[in-house]
Image (tube, rainbow, N blue to C red):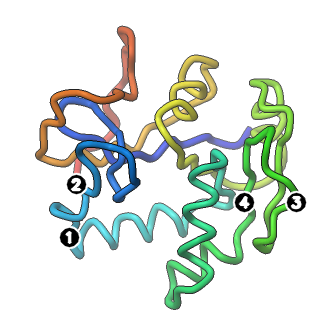
Amino acid sequence: MRKLIVTEFVSLDGVMEAPGGESGYIHTGWVADFFTDELGEYKFREQDASDTLLLGRRTYEGFYGAWPERDGPMAEKINTMEKVVVSTTLGAPDWQNTRVITSPTPEAIRELKEQDGGPILAHGGVRFAQALVRADLVDEYHLLISPFAHGGGSPLFTELTRLKLIDVK
C-alpha cells in the first residue's frame, strides 16, 4: 500500500492558514519570512521522492496558476508527475497528468493508496487536510513549522491527536 504524506507549512501554534499569500486572510504570506535555501532543498527532496500529488481544488488552482510557468528541477517534477485533485466542482483539468476524483470519499482515497506506485504527497487547505486526518488516511505528516504564532485561524488538528515523532530537522 502506498504511503499518504500530508505536508503543510504550519505556525508554531499549529495554524496552517494562508502561508503562501492567499487572499482574504488577516495573516497571509508568512512562510516567505522564514523560507531558506535549506527548506527549499528539503521541499525538493520531499517532492522528488513522491510519485503522486493529491490536491484539493483550491490548491490545485494555485499550483496550476504557478508551476506550469516555472523552470528548474522542482517545476519539472511537479509539472510531469501524476496529480490527483479531489473536487466535486472542477471540470476537466488542463494540466498534464492530472485527473479528478469527483467522489471525494475516504474510499476513493483508499483506492488511490492501494494502486501501484510510490508515496502520495498531499497538499491542500486546512479543510482538505483535516478531512484526511478525520478519515484516518494519513500515514505520515511533514510539518514545516515556522517560528511564528498565528494567534488565531484554523489549526491542522482540532482534537487530541497522538503522533509518533520519526524525525526532526
Residue 83: assigned label: 4
Q: Secondary structure at mark 2?
A: helix
Q: Secondary structure at mark 3?
A: loop
- Residue 162, given in percent of the width and then of the height, sits at 37, 14
| Amino acid type at image mark 3 | Ala
| Amino acid type at image mark 4 | Lys
Looking at the picture, tell me which residue is in the foreground, 142 or 13.
13
Residue at left offset 71%, top offset 77% = 80
Q: Along the polypeptide, which appears first: circle 2 or circle 4?
A: 2
Residue at left offset 11%, top offset 46% = 147
Residue under numbered circle 2: 30
| Distance Cα–Cα, label 1 vs label 3 | 36 Å
| Amino acid type at image mark 2 | Trp
Residue under numbered circle 3: 92
| Amino acid type at image mark 1 | Thr
| Distance Cα–Cα, label 2 vs label 4 | 26 Å
Q: Along the polypeptide, which appears first: circle 4 or circle 3?
A: 4
Q: How dense is the environment of label 3, judged by Cα within 10 Å: few (below 14), some, or many (20 and up)? A: few
Residue under numbered circle 1: 36
| Distance Cα–Cα, label 4 vs label 3 | 13 Å
| Distance Cα–Cα, label 4 vs label 1 | 26 Å
Residue at left offset 57%, top offset 65% = 63
